[in-house]
Amino acid sequence: MHAKVAPMSSHAYRLYGLTIFLSAFLLFLIQPLVGRHLLPIFGGATAVWATSLLFFTTALFLGYAYTYYLSRLAPRLQVRIHFGALLIALLAVIVVPLLAGSIYPSLAWTIESTLPPAAQVLLALAMTIGVPYLLLATTGPLVQHWFGVMESKEPYHLYALSNIASFIALGAYPFLIEPMFTLSFQKGLWTTLFVLFILLYAAITLAFMRRAGTSHADTHNEATAPSFADRFRWVGFAALPTALLVATTAEITQAVAPVPFLWVIPLALYLLTFVVAFRGWGSGGLVPTLVIVSSAATFAVLGFSYEALTRQMIAYLGFFFFSCLYCHAQLYASRPQHSFSSLFYLMIALGGMLGTTFVSIIAPLIFTDILEFPMGIALAAGVAITFFPAMRYVRDEYVRGVMVLRLLTLIAVLIVSINHFQTRNEWYTLVSRNFYGVVKIGETTDERSLYHGTTFHGKQMLDPELAYIPTTYYTSQSGFGRAMQYVRAVHGKRPVTVGTVGLGTGTIAAFCKDKDQFIFYEIDSRIEDIAREHFTYLEHCAGSEVRIGDARLLLDKERREGNPADFDLLAIDAFSDDTIPAHLLTKEAVELYMSHLRDDKSILAIHVSNRYLNLDPVVRRIAEELGLAHKVIAASGNPAEYGTYSEWVVITRDPAILASRLFDDALEKTTEAPLWTDDYMNILAVLDMPAIYNFDSE
């Protein structure tokens, strides 16, 4: 039983509350901020966010471990050590930028790095925000522990306050901060608030030093210390929600709607359940009932369906919310006395780290598809069934019957899950997964197709006479196809040099002729293997070459070394799974592309087809800013050409090129967009997702 909590003094609550609120706000504000600066370099893959969550949860665990061991020392020694930590963090955010020019170091080292992509992401995050993030991670548990010691009051409501601050930060960034402010201003704002936080933290540290020596604080009583079973329970009920967080995010951003910053919604719901649970709500039989019901509903709508997006989103997020609320309510119900709060939070952090480690690192190594979400559904339903609190309401003579019913229900969950896993990919001849996502190959009697997540990425006809017809987004009537025809007409019999950012099946190589040079930039080396082993477009082009790495970094390196490619035509088509590596669509990026064109008769073609983002206004605005001529070319997807609807923005320095009859039927576009630069972009301004917020018509 927990003792009745006395009211907090208003002065103490304000000081501790403000410090915890600001630390949590900064802790979660830095996540999208550093993602905006660093993560597009790694291709915009969903796994980038999953790996980032691993970094964040690991840093939280280290911060909580620091707090746990620090709290076991004498008060004055705690203060001396922590003042040193405060000073190091302050130097990291003030002195390092003055010496290095930025708190965010260059990522040029990734070009030559042999580290796996996940290790590169973790290293980049450690180099940028490692020190200040670790200090922020210590704040919640340490300040709550000090508050409990000095005020002799239960501190757990402060934990709910920290999650409210985190929730506000997550909502503020995509909807207010990013659309309104440049990246440099965002960094300055964060640094200023961090310095203010350091001052508040230092004030609390001094107050603890003055009062700890005279307070009659509780000391650890080994006789009443939490048992191993309690600790295991805390780890388990913390691990499941974080595993579901990563799995649900991957599912909705790959299988449902791959849109940047959609990951904010699951994370916000995750934090909201902490707030609700640590206010004492969510216990009882209602929440586990909702977990079981929502699990069944979610299993019923698994699998991609553009027409059922609303139902899928409601089902997935509803299941996720109830599952997290159930687990977090279980944590709150089993919380220890405040003298063991640091141990409690350490176990929660350990569970969070283990959950994200499994889904972000282990699962991609052992599964060929994204199976964590359906596995998470089955596991959450199983946990809710196993620990369902109905036993306390059942008469003794019915207990055995309830146990049998519980067992039969668990068996049913297991059977449904196994059937789902066995039939999930029965129509595909290849399923491959790595850091950059899931790639599948489907085959019929006439064609072989490539899919990245839920997005169609090209096909090749199996009839040898049709094998080298440019299909899908690259037919002769597409924007790229017309640009290719113009380049051929201008240069006559001279071989041409064509560059492509993004490989896919290599369909563009179908346009290759003798002595032409076709250079592909591809961030995922696995795609080259698939293009060569399962498709023959690259084999058709003797002058083809694939360069592995982030295209923008590679092109920038080539320019700095004085080796521009001199492309007659450069195509930008790297938007895998409908996500966008946003750094490929900025003013500076387009300037880089233009520097690699051979002359004024060369063309830049950018593929902007997208189910969820209206990208052509972004590209047109950049072209206008740079004084470049441009037209939007749409191809309806003629079945006779095995084509797919596509939109390309064709850009050139010479307006006379676009006066050619090849570009006569360009689309008239009037929609405007803000100017995207390396310092500013606004995803929300181009978001077009009516199926998400309108109910589907049957």
Image (spheres, rainbow, N blue to C red):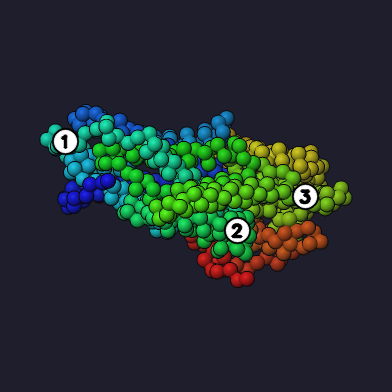
Left or right: where does residue 471 sit relative to residue 183?
Answer: right
Disc assigned to residue 212:
1
> How far is disc 3 from disc 2 in space, using C-alphas?
26 Å
Outermost residue on the left side: it is 214
For marks 1 and 2, the one nearer the N-term is 1
Residue that badge 3 annotates: 443
Q: Which residue is mark 2?
A: 300
* Distance from the alpha carbon under mark 1 to that under mark 2: 57 Å
Mark 3 touching mark 2, by CB under 8 A? no
x, y percent for residue 7 = 18, 52
x and y percentages locating residue 206 in the rendered image: 18, 37
Residue at the image point whose x is 63% and y is 60% from the top: 305
Residue 640's disc is: none
Q: Nearer the viewer, residue 288 or 43?
A: 288
Specify the amino acid type for callout 3.
Glu
Q: Is residue 662 left or right of residue 403?
A: right
Of the pair 460 and 569, the residue shown nearer to us: 460
Q: Amino acid at mark 1?
A: Ala
Badge 3 element: strand
